[in-house]
Amino acid sequence: MTRETVTLSTTSDFSGWRAWARKLLHDRVPADSIQWIIKAPPSLYAPSAMRDLPAAPSTTSLPRALAALFPAVFVSEAPDRLHLLYLTLETLRDGMPLPDELTQRLQGLARGSQEKALDLRCQMPDARTPECQIIRTSHTAALIDSQTEALSNLRPTPWIVMAPERTLYWDGRHPHFGPGFTGDDLPSSGLVESARSFATAGSSNAWWNGIAPVRLHPASEDIASSPSLASLRARAIDCRMCELCGPATRTVSGEGNPKARIIFVGEQPGDQEDLQGRPFVGPAGQMFDRALREAGGHRADTWITNAVKHFKFIPRGNRRIHQKPDASDVTACAPWLAAERRVLAPGVTVMLGVTAASAVLGRPVTVSRERSRHIPLEDGSIGLVTVHPSYLLRLPDEESKTREYTKFVTDLRMAISALAG
């Protein structure tokens, strides 16, 4: 039997594998006749490079659930992973049912990759520190490459992943790939620059344009069983439970002190929050920070989040105009907020505005009727309703702004005092 040898550039060269698989399937080359090998081209880490791939029509239609497994299987460490994926396509092309053993093997390999992806994501610091952060890991190059998009969404500000097989540098706008680098023998002062010098290949290098992201596809049971705030944040990046994930730039999870006894819940991320990946950093967030300080609190001691984790807006020219989330948006995000509160177990939950209050209390709320008083919550903790700081920004005159701001500070002071009571 004549054997076909196919060379891929890296262990994460999914586009290369897919192009060759389509051609070989079209030419009816059997799976057992293909030898898949990995060999880096000379231009792999060049700043720019071109590549040629075979073109052939697709001969197979993949069910969505099965297609979702492919990237995760591809980056697994199983020696026969490429053979298994091609065999799957070959079986479907011929109209045959997939053997249960093959399906279970694919699911097992995918699950293993997703668990490793979750572990890597949990190592990524949030964006509160603007300085370039270094993440040291032993994960494989393929796994790291597959998380480029997720990691940049988790932390839009610069970072470097350093591993024996890969250096991945995110400059705040674009990823840069390089060979393995640990920097164990370098002083910390020169580590960032040295790591950057290793990561030389970017988006202009075609060898790196076909990496398939490994997603976690979080379901309600995954959210409910997540043991930590870090794992919730890592899973939330891939949330597709409502349509807001499409237009928004990223999921914006809560941030703050993981041991906080007080949690502040707002409505949803705004334009700046969506871009920076942090809650309450726009004009309303700045007013909140000021009021919290005047009330005797410190943002670093609290947890700040939103009832809805994606920015809902309508485009208008170059601007994105905030749109109030509807009940279905709040319902879709409810598992995330419930999980945050479960993990934190706060003594006090402050609801900033009607959307947050309705989300926490599970009923319609009129803020003017229910603000400024302690509300017993089902878990035995205390709730307090107040206005959202964006309300203060919309007031038409200085007298109203001063009066309502004073009431807002009083509400925050009441919430902080409740912890001591």
Image (cartoon, grey):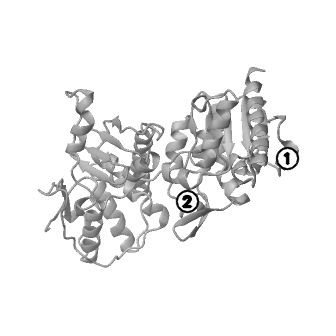
Q: Mark 2: give few (<14), some (14-19) or many (20+) Cα within 10 Å.
A: some
Residue 310: x %, y % from top left? 58, 55
Q: Secondary structure at mark 1?
A: helix
Residue 66: x %, y % from top left? 45, 62
Residue 240 figure quarter:
bottom right
Amino acid tagged 1: Ser
Residue at 79%, 42% (x, y): give it.
403
Residue 228 figure quarter:
top right
Residue 415 figure quarter:
top right
Residue 354: x %, y % from top left? 77, 50
Residue at 30%, 46% (x, y): give it.
169
Quarter of the image with the N terminus is bottom left
Q: Nearer the viewer, mark 2 or mark 1?
A: 1
In the displayed orientation, state which residue is furthest to the bottom.
57
Quarter of the image with the C terminus is top right
**Left or right side of 163 for 399:** right
Q: Mark 1: give few (<14), some (14-19) or many (20+) Cα within 10 Å.
A: few
Q: Secondary structure at mark 2?
A: helix
In the displayed orientation, state which residue is furthest to the front.
398
The span from disc 2 to disc 1 (Cα, nearest Å) is 32 Å
**Left or right side of 225 for 91:** left
| Residue underneath mark 2 | 245
**Left or right side of 223 for 3:** left
Residue at 26%, 56% (x, y): give it.
202
Which of 403 and 104 lies nearest the eye of the viewer? Answer: 403
Amino acid tagged 2: Cys
As drawn, 243 above or below 193: below
Which numbered tag is attached to residue 368? 1
In the displayed orientation, state which residue is furthest to the top.
420
